[in-house]
Image: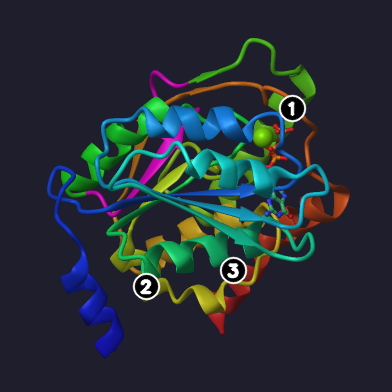
Amino acid sequence: MENVEARQEDRTRTVAGVGRVGVVLPTYDEAETIAEALRRLAELDLPDLCVVVVDDGSPDGTADLAEQAAADWREGRLLHVVRRTSKDGLGRAYVAGMRTALELGCAAVVQMDADLSHPADAVPRMIAALADGADVVVGSRYAEGGELDADWPWSRRLLSRAANTYVSVLLRMGVRDATAGFVAWRAEVLERMDLSTIRSNGYAFQVETKWRARQLGAELREVPITFSERAAGSSKMSLQVKLEGLAMPWRLLLSRRR
Ligand SMILES: Nc1nc2c(ncn2[C@@H]2O[C@H](COP(=O)(O)OP(=O)(O)OP(=O)(O)O)[C@@H](O)[C@H]2O)c(=O)[nH]1
Ligand SMILES: [Mg+2]
């Protein structure tokens, strides 16, 4: 507890009263997009920005490219690459990256994909919503004003809508985009959630974390975004990951009853 308090005092209050902003990018074979993803983040007007790339030993050298990008990083900003040895799932990668961001004194932590699907220029709007009192801000495809890339295949649209409806009916999450992977968190919410207790390995992480935040009484808000089809590379969504997503709402409901 002492450590947490010390870290909270450490946090420099720079961005609209929120503090140091950390962005966590999980990567597996994103060599074609990582440099551009980092360039877009570096362009943001966030002077105390801290980016954490969590790479699971990508064979295509993504982690090396991320480290090279750090050389051009502006003074005062931090780019940290966490190198893990094997592919261990998106959820595990996020837990590792969020822990690192908290240890680096970030007062807000943004999670986003590294394939250019999530617009970096929405980050300041999400941080502004945190500064305005929200605890968790979802970069939302389905909020009023949000959009999906016209190139997104109908099969993905259907899957995404069906997954959202399924989760919303079972868990009543209070947001339209419950499966979104673009989210800004107040550090305090992540600390209270206790990341070591998150069980999801894959995409179910998005649902489990938002639900846990709701259980803690956190205020979730949505900021509309335009979601783009991944710019290059290939999807890592497997059947196992989809099955975990199907089971997760029931596991959460059962855990609450217990
Ligand atoms: N470190 C790590 N990153 C992962 C893993 N699985 C996926 N990612 C990253 O997580 C982000 C989201 O994965 P995607 O494959 O783009 O998933 P998606 O956006 O649902 O699928 P597409 O729309 O097809 O791109 C990307 O930056 C991936 O590189 C993993 O096991 N480990
Ligand atoms: Mg993607």
Instruction: Report the span colored magenta.
Output: 134-146
Sort mark 3 into few (<14), some (14-19) or many (20+) by Cα contacts within 10 Å. Answer: some
Residue 143 appears in the figure? no
Q: Earlier in the sequence, mark 1 or mark 3?
A: 1
Q: CA distance from mark 3 to mark 2?
A: 19 Å
* 214 relative to 197 in the view: left or right: left
Residue at mark 2 to residue at mark 1: CA–CA distance: 33 Å
Which residue in the protein does label 3 denote?
Answer: 252
Foreground label between 2 and 1: 2
Residue drawn at (33%, 46%) of the image: 49
Question: Does mark 1's beta carbon lie closer than 8 Å to ligand 1?
Answer: yes
Q: Kindly state the secondary structure of the residue where label 1 is placed.
A: helix
Assess whether mark 3 and mark 1 are in contact (beta carbons under 8 angstroms). Answer: no
Camera-side mark, 1 or 3: 1
Percent position of residue 167, x then y: 60, 49
> Is residue 213 rendered magenta in the image?
no
Q: Report which residue position mark 2 lands on.
A: 191
In what quadrant does ligand 2 lie? top right
Residue 94 locus on image (x, y percent):
57, 59
**Amino acid at pointer 1:** Arg
